[in-house]
Image: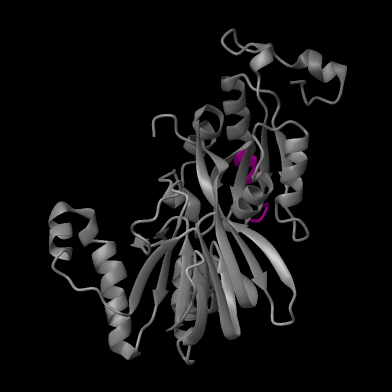
Amino acid sequence: MTLSSSSAAESASTPEPPKDHPATMRQTAAVVYNPIKVDIAAVRAAVKKAEKNAGWNTTLWFETSVEDPGGGVTARAVAEGADVVIAAGGDGTVRAVAEALRGTEAAIALLPSGTGNLLARNLNLSLDNLTDSVATAFAGRDRPIDLGLVDVEREDGERERFVFVVMAGIGLDAKMLANTNPKLKKRVGWLAYVDAIARSLRDDNSMNIRYDLDGQGRKTMKAHTVLVGNCGLLPGNIMLLPDAAVDDGIFDIVALRPDGLIGWVQIWIKIVWENGVLRRSSVGRKIMAYSKEVRTVRYSKGKQIVVRLDEPQDFEMDGDSVGKAIAIKTWVDPLALTVRVPANS
């Protein structure tokens, strides 16, 4: 692989790689960064040090924008020879980079920023340690994971295709995200969602749903939210989908169907108490064996689900609102993304 320097003088000034990193093995990293989310000076310093220690080529740098949240510049990075693309930003940046890397040989490395960091949380990666995250990009190992693909149909018949890495949801959870005040979120982080939940719950949020899971035939259901997940851990240590795995080739799906205040209490007990607390210990799991399933939370699994609604509903992917949908079709693309994780994980 050739050096990315733009002149012979620059090439001459580039130090020879260490003996255990022969020139023929030298790799190239690229950083795709959201300038609003990251301290770029600190990131550049950490990357320069790790790059030198690893004996890699000069790192490529690409800034995201409103017009290009990461997909276009990631494609450029791969075209210019990047072996690893470091996504430095929030969940939207990670999703855009992952979408562009789908089906390529390049890996994604995560430099978490923002309030969600959903994929990093589910892979148990460092959330607030710049040095560790950068070191993983240059010296970690590759782990293939599944991706979710979704075709979204709008009310006017327009269709769009997206990729998600963690989960996609339609209904109340997406409405909550759409109602989140971005300025408040910037100041107080996930506490901003408390305000959004309060505003979202003022309305009747039940949806009439027709769905087909893995071609088993059309069924109907009434629910407030349907979430399709590749993995299941949310901020606040909330385990929404306790059996989800990022590399099993199937989705975990949950429908939340509360009926008044008691229904919401049952959901809270199931998700926060049982999934988040009891499930984490052997004693807790024994206690769960005696608990009854509640109709307000319905779990299922599958490789593909088609959902059609009576009226448009808010839709979200990986914590970002993406407008309203009248129907969605989502399916698994098994092991379609390679993620760089710590070598000892």
Query: In the rendered image of this protein, does residue 336 appear above or below residue 286?
Result: above
Q: Indicate the quadrant where residue 68 lies.
A: bottom right
Q: Can residue 285 be seen in this view?
A: yes
Residue 78 x, y percent position in the rendering = 73, 37
Residue 29 x, y percent position in the rendering = 66, 32
Considering depth in this image, is 208 or 56 the residue closer to the camera?
A: 208
Q: Which quadrant does the N terminus fall into?
A: top right
Query: In the rendered image of this protein, does residue 2 appear above or below residue 19?
Result: below
What are the residue bounds of the magenta stretch? 34-43
Residue 226 x, y percent position in the rendering = 47, 73
Considering depth in this image, is 329 or 36 the residue closer to the camera?
A: 329
Image position of 170 (left or right of 102): left
Query: In the rendered image of this protein, does residue 236 appear above or below residue 51?
Result: below
Q: How many labels does the image show?
A: 0
Image position of 302 (left or right of 59): left
Q: Which quadrant does the C terminus fall into?
A: top left
> Which secondary structure dominates the residues rendered in magenta?
loop
**Residue occupying image coordinates x 72% and y 34%:** 60
Task: Tell me, yes or no, whether the highlighted magenta stretch contains residue 38.
Answer: yes
